Image (cartoon, rainbow, N blue to C red):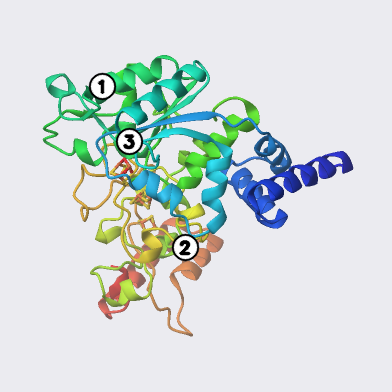
Amino acid sequence: MDQLLIDETHQAASSVERRLGLSRREFMQFCAATAATLGLPAGAEAAIAKAVEKAKRPSVIWLHFQECTGCSESLLRAEHPTLEKLILDVISLDYHETLMAAAGHQAEAAKKAAMEANKGKYILVVEGAIPTKENGIYCKVGGRTALELTKEAAANAAAVIAIGSCASWGGMPSTGPNPTGSSGVAEVLGKPVVTIPGCPPNPYNFLATAVHFLTFGKLPEIDSLGRPKFAYGRIIHEHCERRAHFDAGRFAHEFGDEGHRKGYCLYKLGCKGPETYANCSTIGFGDVGESNWPVACGHPCIGCSEKGVGFAKPIHATAQLKGMSPPASYPNVVEQQGKTSFASMAALAAIAGAAAGGAAMLAKNVGKQDAAGQGKEGQ
Ligand code: FSX
Ligand code: SF4
Ligand code: F3S
């Protein structure tokens, strides 16, 4: 960073320091973490710091429908005490049914006023699915259906964000036979919206999306399902901390067995990491950093963020492997010293250039080792 940028960044940090009582270090950590979540190049935290420092925060109108409020909870109950302050400082949360003090007519009036004052400029955030059967009578707020309220609020919004799997594609309320016709926001509006799926989604994915809007004046790049690519561009299995165990054929077969206790791959317990696009494994939950996500806690991923997987496939059914096939044979879990390993046999066969013969010998020897009862955990 050049000197001017450093000075401006420090200025921004001091201003936020005064406003929120945050230390400069905490604020810069937040900016750096957001820049990293967005996959921005080094130095981008300076632009974020300047944008957050600006007094004018985008107005956010947040609607709640068929859901458990877990999205809001995960956003506001982060362990790190400053995150909550930052969320409320990055955005101007003008209407949020479960957080605002107002109730009844007062709340309705607050929404109307916020929508009028920020016409064409506010961000509409929808949490929860929208029931569509019987003209949407299964979810009403203030006597009006979720269907009506969504369409009305979306009409003058600068951007629409569906937070959580419920709002993104129906989520848990849409589980078959879906008696209320629960649907996602894009389906109801008939146009694409930004979706932040997950049940609940990682708060940083929402926050980073809001900060991107604040910093660059536009929403981040999205995929065909409306998901920001920075967060949902890769399958969990690609960057899972247990991946080496999957590749080596070391699996937990039952909860509490030796493989489970040793932290082996959870694929055979139904982990949907191989067919779920999300960054759970890389940014973690609860603002405590990596290693705080379902798989790290010992439970298979249920694909909560993936349409057609979460709340659709049985939790312990084996996942579909996307873009890969499992190896036909696996190395032993414990290689005994002094014996030729699977890898070294493969290397030797390749070096000898006798691919066909080498492979045949390899198969024969692996067969012998299997017969000797080794590597049971890997089978
Ligand atoms: Fe709950 Fe949100 Fe799940 Fe849904 O999260 S955590 S049921 S995605 O809409 O409140
Ligand atoms: Fe991780 Fe699940 Fe893939 Fe195993 S199957 S490596 S636990 S994501
Ligand atoms: Fe959900 Fe799987 Fe992430 S269950 S929270 S998508 S690890």
Query: Residue at the location (39% across, 29% down)?
Result: 225
State the residue lying farthest toward the front. 106
Q: Residue at x 36, y 63 (%)?
A: 265
User: Which residue matches tag 3?
Assistant: 103
Q: Position of residue 45 (x, y in %)?
A: 69, 43
How far is the residue under mark 2 from the one under mark 3? Answer: 39 Å
Q: Alpha carbon of mark 1 to alpha carbon of mark 2: how far?
A: 39 Å
Q: Residue at x 66, y 56 (%)?
A: 26
* Along the line of sight, the residue nearer the viewer: 357 or 130: 130
Q: Is residue 174 left or right of residue 40?
A: left
| Mark toward the viewer: 2 or 3 | 3
Residue carrying label 2: 291
Q: Are marks 2 and 3 in contact (CB under 8 Å)?
A: no
| Residue type at the position of mark 2 | Ser
Vertical position of residue 378 compared to residue 87: above or below: below
Q: Is mark 3 within 8 Å of ligand 1?
A: no
Q: Identity of the amino acid at label 3?
A: Ala
Residue position for label 1: 147
Q: Nearer the viewer, residue 186 or 309?
A: 186
Category of crowding for the residue at label 1, using alpha-carbon neighbours closer than 10 angstroms: few (below 14), some (14–19), many (at least 20): many
Badge 3 element: loop
Secondary element at image label 1: helix
Q: Earlier in the sequence, mark 1 or mark 2?
A: 1
Figure disc tally = 3
Q: Quadrant of the C terminus?
A: bottom left
Mark 2, other Cα within 10 Å: few <14 / some 14–19 / many ≥20: some
Q: Position of residue 18 (x, y in %)?
A: 71, 49
Residue contact at pointers 1 and 3, CB within 8 angstroms: no
- Foreground mark, 1 or 3, reads 3
